[in-house]
């Protein structure tokens, strides 16, 4: 990418990050259902606007990984059940977005983990996902989760894990695995989760949004 052009993008992103609170769903290649859980993010936005003083547009946008448009959003959400693929252009664009102040939350809706782990090595070849301790501010910034990431839905009997990538000390990417936060954000009649389970999911989501906007 031309350096001058990239600096223009970063300047635009920084300005947008100051004046707007917008979020978007990340559309990726590979055939995975990036569009799953359609009511999840709108419900999380509504919860945040009502409870943590955000003013996020109620309708999240959809952006492709290789698009300059990702730089308009301080927060991107990615989910699905299956295959994920980043080509070289995708990986470079996503890396530039993350190291310049963006934040990506990937929520495994079940089945993404082996693909995500492999493709993220294209984005950060020399950086591994690491488990985020319960003491990290993302678990305390608004609502308290002393034991870390909550469990929303059961799949393989594994504990929930919050995995992350850090750049220069800042958490730039959060991968929530074996938790299913997005299912907990969806309309209540879709999964028939108890209210307390949905509330846990929404509160954890609010923490993620708050962290992304302020760090």
Image: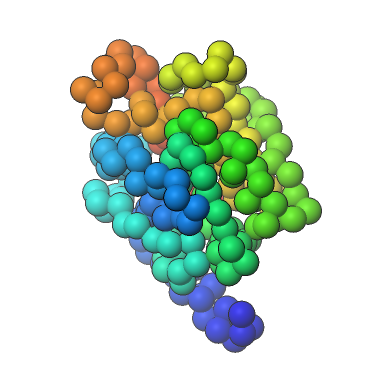
Q: Residue furthest front?
A: 31
**Residue at 67%, 28% in the rendered image:** 133
Q: Quadrant of the N terminus?
A: bottom right
- 123 horizontally vs 175: left or right: right
Number of marks in picture: 0
Residue 84 in the figure: left or right of residue 48: right
Observer-nearest of 45 and 76: 76
Figure quadrant of residue 159: top right
Task: Give the side of residue 36 with respect to residue 143, left or right.
Answer: left
Q: Residue 8: x percent and y percent?
A: 52, 81
Quadrant in the rendering for residue 147? top right
Colour logic: rainbow
Residue 203 location, x and y as percent?
40, 28
**Which is more toward the observer, 83 or 186?**
83
What residue is rendered at 48% in x and 61% in y? 65
Q: Residue at x 40, y 44 (%)?
A: 33
State whether residue 204 appears in this view: no
Vertical placement of residue 70 versus 213, above or below: below
Q: Eyeballing the image, is 12 above or below 45? A: below
Q: Compared with residue 32, is residue 73 higher up or lower down, i.e. above or below?
A: below
| Residue 176 location, quadrant | top right
Judge whether residue 32 can be spotted in this image: yes
Looking at the image, the residue that sits furthest to the right is 126
Q: Position of residue 93 (x, y in %)?
A: 56, 67
In percent of the image, x 40 and y 47: which residue is there? Answer: 34
Most distant residue in the left direction: 189
Residue 165 image offset from top left, x and y in percent:
66, 46
């Amino acid at each position: 990418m031309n350096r001058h052009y990239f600096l223009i993008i970063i300047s635009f992103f920084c300005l947008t990050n100051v004046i707007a609170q917008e979020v978007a769903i990340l559309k990726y290649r590979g055939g995975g259902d990036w569009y799953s859980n359609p009511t999840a993010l709108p419900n999380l936005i509504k919860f945040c606007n009502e409870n943590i003083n955000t003013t996020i547009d109620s309708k999240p946008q959809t952006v492709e990984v290789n698009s300059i448009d990702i730089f308009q959003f301080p927060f991107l959400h990615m989910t699905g059940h299956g295959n994920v693929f980043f080509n070289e252009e995708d990986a470079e664009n996503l890396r530039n977005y993350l190291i310049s102040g963006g934040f990506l939350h990937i929520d495994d809706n079940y089945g993404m983990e082996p693909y995500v782990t492999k493709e993220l090595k294209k984005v950060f070849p020399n950086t591994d996902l690491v488990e985020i301790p319960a003491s990290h501010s993302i678990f305390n910034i608004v609502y308290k989760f002393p034991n870390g990431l909550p469990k929303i839905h059961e799949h393989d009997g594994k504990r929930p894990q919050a995995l992350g990538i850090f750049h220069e000390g800042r958490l730039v990417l959060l991968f929530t695995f074996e938790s299913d936060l997005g299912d907990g954000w969806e309309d209540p009649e879709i999964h028939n989760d108890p209210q307390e389970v949905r509330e846990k999911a929404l509160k954890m989501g609010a923490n993620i949004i708050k962290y992304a906007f302020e760090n």
